[in-house]
Structure formats: structure tokens, C-alpha cells
């Protein structure tokens, strides 16, 4: 885990997210917490990661998602060298 992220505020945020019971509660919380642009950016990065795992090319991903090649590259680095957060989520969502 990145020590730069760990603090009481981030701990509280993660506890808040883990307390949500269903997708509707997630929509309500994230609509209050994030701007539309922030939430779309998070969603876009998750979709980019999903497509990269499927072996889709950067060009195809950029076309499908509207993500820049810089964003695609950043997500790809996280997949290759990150903390395995994407892997954990995908293994649970796409067994």
C-alpha cells in the first residue's frame, strides 16, 4: 500500500464506501461526493483497465472509451506495477 495515501481521512472514506449496501446507495453517495467529471473519470479508468486485461489495443480503447493515451498508459502501469487493486476487483466481478 502506498504510505502517502494512508491517513485517518482516507481510512474514513474507505470505511464509508465499505458501509454501502447496494448499487443505489453507491450512486447516492458518489453523486454527493464526486463531481460528474470525477465519477466519469473513475469509471473510465476502470473500463480502460478491463479492456487492457482483454488485450485490446490502445487505439481501440481510446476510441471506445474516449480516454487519452496518457490515461491508458497510466492505467496499464498500474496493472503491471501497481498494488493489484484492479486484479482483486476483476477476479471478484469476472470469475
Image (spheres, rainbow, N blue to C red):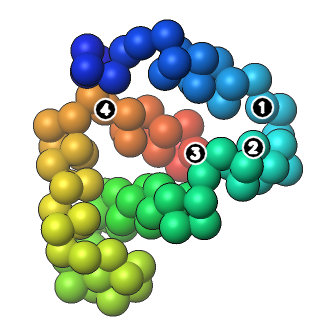
Q: Secondary structure at mark 3?
A: helix
Sequence-first disc among 4 and 2: 2
Residue 60 to residue 11: above or below: below
* Image position, residue 1 (x, y; %): 29, 18
On the image, numbered disc 4 is attached to which residue?
84
On the image, numbered disc 2 is attached to which residue?
29
Say few, some or many: other residues with alpha carbon within 10 Å of mark 4 (under 14 / 14 to 19 / 20 or more).
few
Q: Is residue 17 left or right of residue 1?
A: right
Sequence-first disc among 3 and 2: 2
Say few, some or many: other residues with alpha carbon within 10 Å of mark 1 (under 14 / 14 to 19 / 20 or more).
some
Residue 9 to residue 44: above or below: above
**Residue drawn at point x = 49 percent, y = 39 percent:** 89
Name the one closer to the observer, 75 or 54.
75
Sequence-first disc among 1 and 3: 1
Question: Gap between marks 2 and 1, in whole Å?
Answer: 8 Å
Residue 77 to residue 16: above or below: below
Q: Which mark is residue 93?
A: 3
Amino acid at each position: 500500500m502506498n504510505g502517502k495515501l494512508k491517513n485517518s481521512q482516507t481510512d474514513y472514506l474507505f470505511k464509508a464506501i465499505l458501509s454501502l449496501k447496494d448499487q443505489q446507495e453507491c450512486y447516492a453517495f458518489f453523486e454527493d461526493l464526486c463531481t460528474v467529471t470525477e465519477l466519469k473519470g473513475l469509471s473510465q479508468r476502470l473500463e480502460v483497465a478491463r479492456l487492457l486485461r482483454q488485450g485490446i489495443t490502445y487505439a481501440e480503447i481510446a476510441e471506445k472509451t474516449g480516454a487519452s493515451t496518457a490515461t491508458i498508459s497510466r492505467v496499464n502501469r498500474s496493472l503491471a506495477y501497481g498494488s493489484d487493486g484492479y486484479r482483486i476487483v476483476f477476479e471478484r466481478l469476472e470469475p
